[in-house]
Image: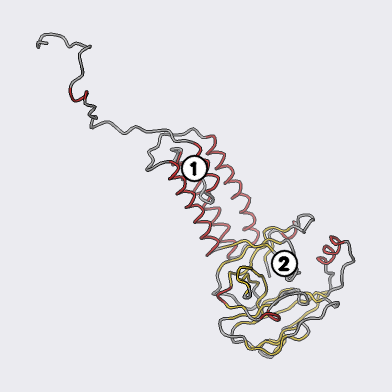
Amino acid sequence: MTANEPPNPYSAPNAALADGAADETAQPRRRHPSRLPALAVAFFGSPLLGAGLYLLGRPRRFRAWAIAGGLLLATMIVAIRLPLPRLAVFAIGPIALAALLALVDTAIVKPGEARLIGKPWVLALALILAGQGSARAIRQWLVEAFQMPSGSMVPTLLVGDHVFVKKGRSSVARGDVIAFEFPVDRSTDYMKRVVAVGGDVIEVRDGVPSINGIPLAHEPIAQPCSFRDESASSAGAEPEPCTLVRETNAGRSYTIVFEPEHRAMDQPRTVIPDGHVFVMGDNRDNSYDSRKWGTVPVDHIKGTATVTWWSKAPGGPVRWSRVGRGID
C-alpha cells in the first residue's frame, strides 16, 4: 500500500496488537462479586456489621454500618461497666435491629464494581474471623453474659436471670457479686457474693458473718418472700417460710434470705489468705459456697455482675420487672 492509498479495513492488525500487547493506559477489568460470600460474612461476622457490603463493592455503606454498630456496641459496654442498667438494656434492641438491617441490606443491595485482593471466599473467611475475634476479645476483657441456674443467690438473683458481668478482678471488693471459676472444677462457673478478702478474719455463726471480730449489720425487712411463692407455684407446693434481711458489708447494703426450715452453715474463725476471697450465697441457708469448699483464688475471678438484662421463670413467664435492674 502506497502513501496515497487509503487504509484497508480488512488488513491484518499490526504486530503489536496481533501479539496481544496491552495498552499501557488501560485499567484492569473490574468484576461484580458474588453475593454468597457477602451474605456469609453478614451472617457470621458479627459484631462487624456491614462487612459483607465491602465484598459487594459498597465500601461507603460498609463504613456507615460499621460505625453505627460500633457506636451502639460501645454504648452498651460502657453502660454495663459503669453501670447504667437501663441504658445497657436499651442498647440491646438497636444492636439486634442494626444487625438484622445490615443483613437485609447485604441481601438486596445492587453490587458495585470492586477490586478485591485475593479470592472472595478467602477474604470472606478473613472478615468472619475478624468479627468473631473481636467478639471473643469483648467477652475476654470487657463484658460477658451469664445465666443463673440455681437459687443460691436469691433474692438478688433468681433462677432464670441473665446477667452481664464487668470483666476484671483488680477492683473486686467486699459486697460485690462475682462470677468465677469453681476452684474444685475450673470448667464450671459460679456466682456468689464476696464477704471477706485477703487478710480479713472471718467467722460465721447462724449465717451471720463477723469480719475482723465485728458482726455484719443485719436489719430485718418486713415484706413477704415473693420469689418463694413463684417457686412453690411452679412446683405445685406451699411456699416455705423465710425471712428477708438487709446486710451491710464495707458500706455496701444488699438483701439476703434465711429459711427457718433449714440450718445455716457455720464457719470457724479463719484468716483469708492474700490473693483469695471468701464468698457466700445470698440464700444463706441454701448455698454451696466457701463454707463448704474454701476460698476463691483471685485469678479465678472473671468479673463483677452489674446488670440483669433478661429474666424468665423456668417454665413460666418473662419477669419484665427484673429486666434492666442493677445488681446490689
Q: Quadrant of residue 115?
A: top left
Amino acid type at circle 2 is Leu
Q: Are marks 1 and 2 in contact (CB under 8 Å)?
A: no
- In this view, the residue in front, 254 or 211, is 211
Q: Which numbered dot is residue 157?
A: 2
- Does 128 appear above or below 267? above
Left or right for 214, reference 71: right
Instruction: Please state, as top left, top right, bottom left or bottom right, where the C terminus lies in the image.
Output: bottom right
> Which residue is depicted at the point 59% across and 44% down?
100
Q: Is residue 141 above or below residue 36?
A: below
Question: Splitting the image into 4 quarters, where does residue 165 fall?
Answer: bottom right
Residue farthest along the right direction in this orientation = 238
Query: How far separated are the C-alphas under marks 1 and 2?
Result: 40 Å
- The amino acid type found where label 1 is placed reads Gly
Q: Tell me the residue that label 1 is attached to.
A: 52
Residue at 79 percent of width and 56 percent of height: 315
Q: What kind of element bears circle 1?
A: helix
| Residue located 56% across and 67% down the image | 167
Pinpoint residue 200: horizontal percent, then vertical percent.
Answer: 62, 87
**Viewport quadrant of the N terminus:** top left
